[in-house]
Image (spheres, helix red, strand yellow):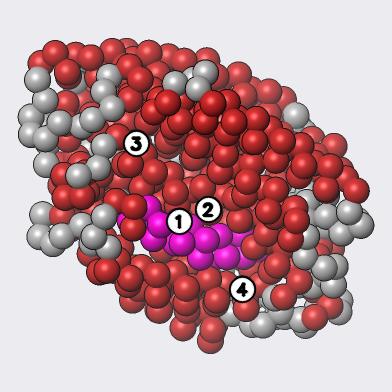
Amino acid sequence: MSSTDSFAGTTPTAAAPTYPSLRAAALPLLALCLAFFVEMVDNTLLSIALPTIGRDLGSGTTALQWVTGAYSLTFGGLLLTAGAAADRLGRRRVLLVGLAAFGAISAAVVLVSSSGELIALRAALGLAAAAMAPVTMSLVFRLFDDEKLRMRAITVVMIVGMSGFVLGPLLGGTALAHVSWQWLLLVNAPIAAIAWLGVRYGVPADHPDGLTRDPLDLPGAAWTVAAMGLGCYTLTSGVEHGWTSWPTVACALGAVLAAVGFVRRERRTAHPMLDLGLFASGPVRGAAITQVASSIAMASVLFALVLHFQYAYGWGPVRAGLANLPLILTMLAATPVAERLALRWGHRVACLVGAALLALALAGMALSVEHGYVAIAVSLVVLTVGLRIVMTICAVALVTAMPHDRTSIGAALNDTAQEVGTSLGTAVVGTAIATLVTTTLPAGTWSTALVASYFGGERTTFLVLAVVVGAIATYGALSLTGSRATDDH
């Protein structure tokens, strides 16, 4: 099967038009970029406001961890279900529903008055966003027949999306200087509305022949959500109740049983949500594993540094947001690096380079926490180059390895891997800080002893993550092929 035949919308029976250049596809591409941006920026927009939210709502480290993690949890848990639904109901239709829900739920933040309500709202936002991310990437691939144009288009969308991810703290910090933290979510409503209009009038509807008629695997979706939810809560329960307490042990066993149930379901059902046989393919298996590792690295660093800058350094939200500029600038400057490495050395070697940079950056971060911002910024630059390499190559390798009527589930698998890593990274750092430092974030300036304790906790956490992330990313990269093209079939 040729690479051209491997995408929805490129078979002779699919009537959706394709475009000869990025300029010709400017309107639909802009709409899809905006949809991806609003979903990605919401991942980190609140991160800079965590101390403010903690003081306003009386939240401790565990609650703040769940303000961040609830979004990632429902997002990651339902991505595969949303991708499977889009391949059956229509990709544009599912994206429009997701955008409408995302805007409406964001507007409901004006009713929030407790950390529990905010966590519930964030979980609902994650559900809506799950209908957006994989569909966006799938529709981008469908806009073009030419492989090079697809590579460039996905790079454009990823730059916009990742810019939103790293711009979130900066935008949030700037806004907090003038408005309350609720506005950080409320602003999503008009952005989602604009994206909805752009998709509705700029992106053509799916042709029925480009969709699959297999029924949805709802039991498989339930097993997925249960496994992820119980797995992440196990980490929190360990701190609150003890690692050998019955709630912690029960959650851990429940997570394992749910994962086993999902695997058994997918192997036995005639119409699985995720064909596990796809993981026999090196690009699918390797890309998913490496994406998990890269997201663990990014989420752990962002979550830890939010507290580091505002509590240990005593910086305000705007200054803390500006401290993320190395990520933003490097994300843009490193865009050509991944493609050049892939063309010269192939996907496997390029991702091995990215894996080494991730491990090096985390080790550097462990050594930098007590040596000021400049040392931290250098590690951020190294981390971002590694992320850019891994995320670009793995996204292309994974999605292009999927059958033509499963592009949404392929994109969903890519995003699921990233969100699993994000949820794990946030949970691990939040749990480590609560275990090694404190379970309650004191108001006002931290004492010298507490700052020193926090630095020690960061150092230990980053050193452990350097080993774990490096090992996982290296294993995943070795499963990729040596292809220098964008097609890993």
Q: Count all numbered tags in the image, as a single digit.
A: 4
Q: Toward the viewer: 10 or 336?
A: 10
Q: Which mark is residue 123?
A: 1
| Label 1 to label 4: alpha-carbon separation | 19 Å
Residue placed under numbered mark 3 in the picture: 62
Tell me, yes or no, whether the two marked residues, 4 and 2, touch with CB atoms within 8 Å: no
Would residue 210 be found to the left or right of residue 408 on screen?
right
Residue placed under numbered mark 2 in the picture: 74
Circle 4 crowding by C-alpha within 10 Å: few under 14, some 14–19, many from 20? many
Is residue 327 inside the magenta stretch?
no
Measuring 72% from the left and 36% from the top, which residue is drawn there? 257
Magenta segment, prevailing SS (helix, strand or loop): helix
Which quarter of the rendered picture does the N terminus lie within? bottom right
| Label 3 to label 2: alpha-carbon separation | 17 Å
Q: Amino acid at mark 3?
A: Thr
Q: Amino acid at mark 2?
A: Thr
Earlier in the chain: of badge 1 and badge 4, it is: 4
Residue placed under numbered mark 4 in the picture: 94
Tell me, yes or no, whether the two marked residues, 1 and 3, touch with CB atoms within 8 Å: no
Q: Mark 3 or mark 2: which is in front?
A: 3
Q: Is residue 196 above or below residue 212?
A: below
Instruction: Decide if residue 486 is in sight here.
Output: no
Q: Mark 1 or mark 4: which is in front?
A: 1
Toward the bottom, the furthest residue is 201
